[in-house]
Amino acid sequence: YNHNYQIVQIPGYVVISVEMIHDVRIVPTDGRSHVGAGIKQWLGDSRGRWEGNTFVVETTNFRDIGAQRETTVFGTTERGRVIERFTRLGPDLIDYQVTVDDPGWYTQSWTASIPMRKAQGPIYEYACHEGNYGLPNILAGRRREERDAAPKR
């Protein structure tokens, strides 16, 4: 649910957009250095490079959000460093590997590998109620309350 990615490559950048909550990262690929250590960002500061047919993204400078760590992309502290590898295996499949190294949360780095398949259909704007199958019942209940509260004819 709302976990589709859109990856767009343009000269000098790769843009990674996540359908859920509209998280977008604009990843420079021109070899520039990371921003200064004093600049912390919600999604960190990402830099990308190509290693053969694998796009490698290194992200540092995360903002430490404390107990809200489950709400961030990788659950990192300011000391976190994340390496992502996007390897295209076919026209509809990318092997996504992520390695998280954060001594502020973990005793050792960890790596996960997830297949990313091409989405069938459009990517929608994230909205809490669109596609929410409970919404018709919520609205029906409210309409009933309005009818019950209305003056009787």
Image: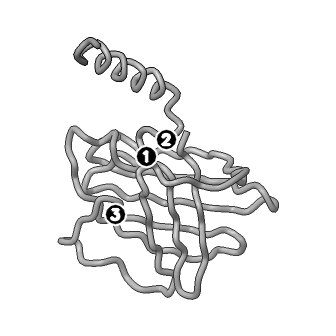
Residue lying farthest to the right in this orientation: 90
**Badge 1 amino acid:** Ala
The residue tagged 1 is: 127
* 76 left or right, relative to 127: left
The residue tagged 2 is: 130
Query: In which image quadrant can residue 54 be found?
Result: bottom right
Foreground pick, 66 / 33: 66
Residue lying farthest to the front in this orientation: 153
Q: Which x, y percent locates residue 78?
A: 24, 57
Q: Residues within 10 Å of mark 2 (few under 14, many from 20)?
A: few
Secondary structure state at the residue bearing disc 2: loop
Q: Residues within 10 Å of mark 1 (few under 14, many from 20)?
A: few
Rendered residue at 78%/59% (across/down): 89
- Please name which of the two marks, 1 or 3, marks the residue nearer to the observer: 1
Q: Give whichever of discs 1 and 3 has the lower sequence position.
A: 3
Rendered residue at 40%/43% (across/down): 108
> Which label number is shown at residue 67?
none
The answer to whether residue 45 is above or below residue 134 is below
The residue tagged 3 is: 44
**Badge 3 amino acid:** Gly
- Please name which of the two marks, 3 or 2, marks the residue nearer to the observer: 2
Q: Give whichever of discs 3 and 2 has the lower sequence position.
A: 3
* 42 left or right, relative to 91: left
